[in-house]
Image (cartoon, rainbow, N blue to C red):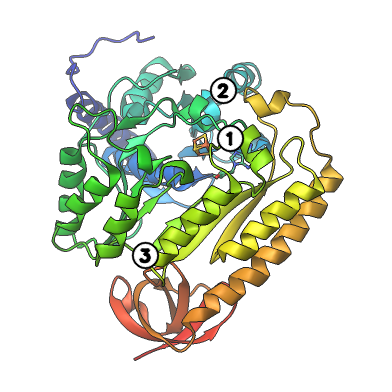
Amino acid sequence: MSKYITDAPVTEPERQYYYMERCREWLAAKKEELGRDLTCGIFTFGCQMNFHDSEKIIAILEKIGYVKTESEEADFVLYNTCTVRENANERVYGRLGQLKTIKAKKNPGMLISLCGCMMQEEHVIERIKKSYKYVDIVFGTHNIYKLAELLYTRIMNNEQIIDIWQEAKEIVEDLPIDRKYSFKAGVNIMYGCNNFCSYCIVPYVRGRERSRTPRDIIREIESFAADGVKEIMLLGQNVNSYGKNLEEPVTFAGLLRMVEQIEGIERIRFMTPHPKDLSDELIETMAASKKICSHVHLPLQSGSTRILEKMNRRYTKEQYLALVERIKAAMPDVSITTDIIVGFPGETDEDLEETLDVVRKAGFDSAFTFQYSRRTGTPAAKMDNQVSDEDMTRRFNKLLKVVQDTAAVRTARMQGKTECVLVEDVNSHDDTMVTGRLSNNTVVHFKGDKSLIGQIVNVRLDECKGFYYIGERV
Ligand code: 5AD
Ligand code: SF4
């Protein structure tokens, strides 16, 4: 690939710091030439994992000297893509088309880059090579840390760089990170997924499960705490499997107990646990903890045991409901949220009724509802009896109504109580108000100004508005 000779170190992360420096020199010369700063616009689609990856990407680009912007007319534009649902892919192609025009008319020096889950699919790469030759740098989910090296290679060679790995090679620690908020941060505890739910593309694009060592995780969180971070979100596709493959195995609950000891950290969140292996040890650890937030995001996907089996979820309707009961018995104030898919192949109206039954019985605080999307390469894509668009929409609307009604009742249980709120932002509609979250993740808006951002304050929950509250600081 490279036509140039370097004295780059061979070990990581030193190699990447070397390339960041080389890119920095190049960028400084460009800046001189143009008489202005060079900007980068990063656009992220999909889940928390992608948003966290984008924080790593932005940190590398800032280290190189780019100035962050929200504009798609930037000098370096990157889409961090998601491929969980088909329409996400189509959106990316659409925006790439628009970017071509912007590049041609407004900023010919623009560098365009693509990364994320969609890039791990062969047919996507073929299409980019053929029809999107103006894209400069393409990388995948396993080699984000190499961005500076790829950028430098692109600058030196002036040709499209595509670098996709089928599997992760190593977990590279100690790279820079740019946090969106000063008071909260995401922390990867593991990568990949081994579950192969039959509708899901994630195991194919994010690879097998790999856990970071507790030592590396704790070290990262300690440095965040020293920086003033109060809340951390531990991230993994299936956090219950954390630590199983480490040289010295550790359970997820064991890791949580270690994180709890870190001074300065006041709230610990995690996502996502799989219902099939959420242990009693985890429930007990949560119930005994002062810092672990009383919120569990517990994806249901379907309430029909027959469909769950076809989805390869490895639990039944009854087991799911029993688990919800165990969690609520140990933590009466807990909030439980979920993900639900309608229109999985072979789903009937009776199956939907089973799902609605679980929604009513479980009492979710909120639910993300999705229409099934047929992902090429997954077992479900080949199943018979794909559900028609018409049935899908009808069932989706029915589900949404029940979710909204039950969630409003459940969320209202806190009405009149005074709770601790971590203030996150000035309210986006009314700048005399701020917005924050309870430990159980419910959103609260109340009168206040930006000086409160990052503080934990007491707020009386006056008025429940369905999914959120209007409150008053006390
Ligand atoms: N179609 C629709 N929804 C999906 N999800 C994952 N794969 C698909 C698919 N093929 C949903 C699941 C998962 C969430 C992140 O996305 O509900 O929990
Ligand atoms: Fe996809 Fe299932 Fe893994 Fe979640 S647990 S990422 S739904 S395969």
Element carrying mark 3: helix
* Side of 408 relative to 462 (left or right): right
Q: Specify which label sits upstream in the sequence, 2 or 1.
A: 1
Q: Amino acid at mark 1?
A: Thr
Residue 325 in percent (x, y) is at 48, 61
Instruction: From the viewer's side, name the closer residue of 292 and 74.
Output: 292
At label 3, counting other C-alpha atoms closer than 10 Å, the crowd grade (few under 14, some 14-19, many 20 or more) is some
Identity of the amino acid at label 3? Ala
Of the two numbered discs 1 and 3 on the same chain, state the one appearing first in sequence. 1
What residue is shown with label 3?
Answer: 330
* Residue 347 falls left or right of residue 200: right
- For label 1, the SS is loop
Say what amino acid the circle numbered 2 marks.
Glu
> Residue 121 has which mark?
2
Determine whether 358 is above or below 406 in the image: above
Identify whether 191 is placed above or below 300.
above
C-alpha distance separating marks 3 and 2: 43 Å
Quarter-wise, where is residue 139 in the image? top left
